[in-house]
Amino acid sequence: MTEGRSRRPGPRIEEVARVAGVSKSTVSRVINGEKYVSERSRQAVHRAIALLGYSPNHAARTLAGSKANAIALVISEQGSRVLADPFFAQVLRGVHAELAGRHVQLLLMMNQPLDGEDQIAYLTGGHVDGALVVSLHGEDPLPRTLHETGLPIVVGGRPLAGGSVPFVDADNFNGALGAVRFLISLGREKIATIAGPHDMAVGMDRLSGWRCGLAEHGMAVELVVHSDFTPDSGALAMEELLRRAPDLDAVFVAADIMALGALRVLQARGYRIPDDVAVVGFDDSVLAATAVPPLTTVRQDVEGFGRTMTWRLLAELAGEEKLPQSMLLPTSLVRRASA
Amino acid sequence: MTEGRSRRPGPRIEEVARVAGVSKSTVSRVINGEKYVSERSRQAVHRAIALLGYSPNHAARTLAGSKANAIALVISEQGSRVLADPFFAQVLRGVHAELAGRHVQLLLMMNQPLDGEDQIAYLTGGHVDGALVVSLHGEDPLPRTLHETGLPIVVGGRPLAGGSVPFVDADNFNGALGAVRFLISLGREKIATIAGPHDMAVGMDRLSGWRCGLAEHGMAVELVVHSDFTPDSGALAMEELLRRAPDLDAVFVAADIMALGALRVLQARGYRIPDDVAVVGFDDSVLAATAVPPLTTVRQDVEGFGRTMTWRLLAELAGEEKLPQSMLLPTSLVRRASA
DNA sequence: TCGGCATCTGGGAGCGCTCCCAGACCCTCG
DNA sequence: CGAGGGTCTGGGAGCGCTCCCAGATGCCGA
């Protein structure tokens, strides 16, 4: 197919061995960082590698060895790509950063080429050593199913029906809690929330944080409307909230993208922001900074998200012990004009 | 490392051969779609494959064969991730869709693990059969360098210093031209533009389209300010334009994200949109629909972008003849409230 | 009739590694 | 002093395929 370039160029492990004055086996040991190699040999091999510009053949290693030298990034996207897009690119960047320098290939899977059974078959078929599963939809069965096959995985976003699946997530609860405390510190007294759908952990955790913040100060925990992470549904939710409590003075919105809709409705109704109603979003997406007025929001480190997932998976593959089953990443409040 | 699961599970090509009653060689021929296989054998092999659930071992094929069965997606991102992010995720989705069903792995590279020399060495080292290079910065030398090594590549976005490098791009020129014609059809007579930077083809092509549109109607081609694809620089550019021509009645902005800044300035200055000044953006990004007022903009099919690039590369790898050197994808005007 | 060609097939070398095994060499301890 | 271990080394089988070669068959035209 690929015309020209018949055989792969570059030196083999055998030549490295010759130049270094050791055997193939020893070179292999050095490359794989095994012990039982003398310092002298190790140095010699490294020099030879540098001299020849040697880089091990991925296919050969995989074929001969017992591991695939590859991990999969599985995007389990059930609709809601709205939330997924910018988010996803950053996660990927983090994953990639963490993979840098290691001889591990990253394979992408998106529920497309093979679905359901086939996808699971592929993943557990020895093509990869482990998987990162980004699953926004909390009730997605994929994480659990994969985990039960024994394939090492790390899920991005707390799975609702998780069992003991290792996961990494932003600390949505404390992020929301912080936002509410901030609103209270501003003197707000009637704080509503536009929450995410019931089936997404990200939404539920933020809702819990809001509840907890209000409860701390003995405030009523009633003004909740669920929505679905689109601007329009955010607008609808805001209308509903205003109908129920025209005198509310703050709204915590579980996602910037919904906050845009809310902002629109508030302004159309003549509420001044933040004077009459303070608005705090979540995510610190691109949208937040360019909103009118610029949105105060809870920032999460999405790139760190990807990095942490990858770190956790690689650590498990390396046989590290006593890894935390799950990890929550800190969030921070970004103060802009809306609150 | 990967504890347990010692040897890879699943049937080998040998077992397929036995079940089908033919030789290894014949099975291999069927898998690779070669000719010189009788219909009877072909059927038998297909049945055996289905029966056993056989899936060829990627590492073995790559090791034994003369091709890598993998292509790279190289993100050559020099800064400006702003533009890159949402764009990038969609491109990736397109690439992935086009790859579905083929036995080709997708490797990601992001200028991180290996830079410059190393990256080129890796790509031309036989690890991949070809590369998709997404390069926003038109003067990026990478596309040309790679192309000169003989590695089949397709560049996303027209390279400024391209030579004869195959590329795929949105039809930025005609998109811009269409936008200007639309503004003229609305009766606008003093149409400015906020253009992209000089070193990005995407910016220059849109600028040319604007120029051409005005020239068609003998209108002055003067109100240009260059900017750099951020909301703030868009705002600055708008201020500059208003200083030079307070009576302008339309602006074509070369990217939605800059249009947001422009919108902000116009509104702050008391211009009504679209009554006093009509605004047209480009990209139809998420930002466009949620802007206030919702932005009329030129839509490009970003997913199609990824698909087309991939299709072109695979076609070349398959040895297809007479492929177009470059391909421009159509754009369309999305009419909202701002014009 | 026989060579030539196109069609179809199987056998087997070998892609570049890893990993098992056997062995050489130390040091420590009973 | 020798047994037992830990340390280091090289040799070589074999991972699951592809691809080359040789051979078997059929059909054509000379």
Image (tube, coloured by chain):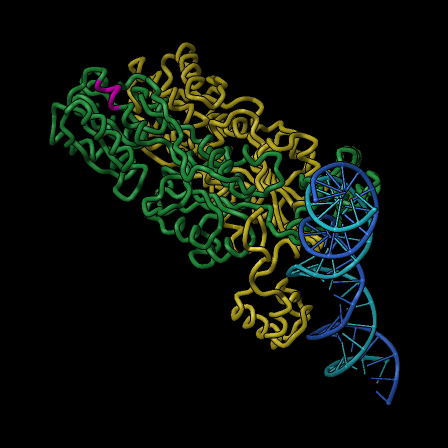
Chain colours: A yellow, B green, C cyan, D blue
Does residue A215 appear left or right of residue A155 in this picture? Answer: left
From where the camera sits, is residue A218 visible? Answer: yes
Q: Over which residues does the magenta segment extend?
A: B180-184
| Picture quadrant where residue B205 is located | top left
The question of residue A147 being in magenta is answered with no
| Residue C26 drawn above or below residue B305 | below
* Residue visible at 49% across and 47% down in the picture: B152
Q: How many marks?
A: 0
Quadrant assignment for the C terminus of chain A: top left
Determine the residue located farthest toward the top in the rendered image: A243
Left or right position of B294 against B57: left
Is residue A317 something one can see in this rendering? no
Main SS class of the magenta portion in the image: helix
Nearest the viewer among B326 and B243 is: B326
> In the image, is residue B122 above or below residue A116?
below
Q: Which residue is depicted at the point 38% across and 46% down?
A: B164
Residue B286 position in % (x across, y down): 39, 27
Q: Is residue A325 above or below residue A26?
A: above
Would residue B68 be found to the left or right of residue D15 on screen? left
Q: Is residue A252 above or below residue A31?
A: above
Q: Position of residue C2 (x, y in %)?
A: 80, 50
In the rendering, at what x and y percent does residue A8 appear? Answer: 58, 58
- Residue A220 image point, x, y percent: 47, 19
